[in-house]
Image (cartoon, rainbow, N blue to C red):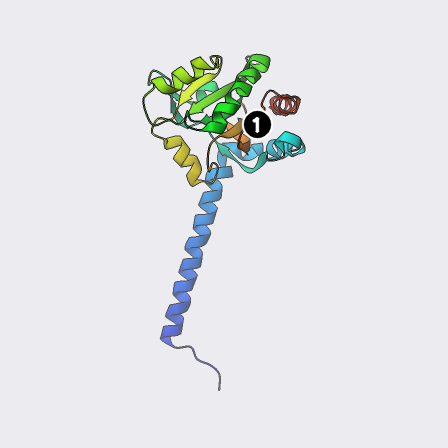
Amino acid sequence: MPFKPSRHVFAAIAIVAVAAGLAAVYVTERGAVESGGRCASAVPLAAALRTFATGDFSALLPADAPADFSSLVLHTPDGGERRVSDLAGQTLVVNMWATWCVPCRTEMPHLQALQEKRGRADFSVVALNVDVGGRDKPTRFLSDIGATSLVDLRDPEMRAFNELKSKGLVLGLPTTFIVNRDGCALASLAGPAKWDSPDALALIEAAIKLD
């Protein structure tokens, strides 16, 4: 005798189907946030940086789905708003740091040296501070170590940090992103690095030429 599913079985199947459909929508929309729109064309640019994930930069993670950083709202030391899109036309090294982060303190002089060696109209190092306290602490720190050539931006309420964290793009500090001149994050590196080393300069030059 052929099996005839009851109404309860049909209801259970319907629930599973709806749940599966919602999951598919979630996955699709999450992917669109990270790789859709204006940064979709940056996928091959990010892939081209894989050859530089060696030596001190073996932890470099080229993005499978470059995220669009252009609309991130950041702040200047005096409290004014600034977006990454304001720096359009430059390849950027965007370093997220805090004064309480010991590896960040070790890394910062190397970022300053990178800016001194390579900072030009087509490239800048952005020091993105995420201290929640007052504005003076990061300013004093950068001044004390002589890191005054960096583009000094702030995320005092950690909104940008939490937005990137929610997408799995940053887990801790320091985290550094290589962002192309269109505001697309091509690669990231978790942890400190010697950003003024020959390997780092080769990586930066490659990223600039890709643009």
Residue 190: percent from left, percent from top: 53, 34
Residue 132: percent from left, percent from top: 34, 28
Q: Amino acid at mark 1?
A: Ala
Q: Residues within 10 Å of mark 1 (few under 14, many from 20)?
A: many
Asked whether, in this view, residue 204 is left or right of residue 83, the answer is right
Residue in the foreground of this view, choosing between 98 and 69: 98
Task: Identify the element where label 1 is drawn.
Answer: loop
Disc 1: which residue: 193
Asked whether, in this view, residue 167 is left or right of residue 113, the answer is left
Q: Residue at x 39, y 16 (%)?
A: 139
Residue 13 occupies which quadrant of the picture?
bottom left
Residue 137: percent from left, percent from top: 36, 19
Is 56 drawn above or below residue 26 in the view shown? above
The quadrant of the picture occupied by the C terminus is top right
Residue 148: percent from left, percent from top: 46, 12
Q: Residue at x 46, y 21 (%)?
A: 127
Residue 153 occupies which quadrant of the picture?
top left
Is 29 drawn above or below residue 116 in the view shown? below
Is 203 drawn above or below residue 162 in the view shown? above
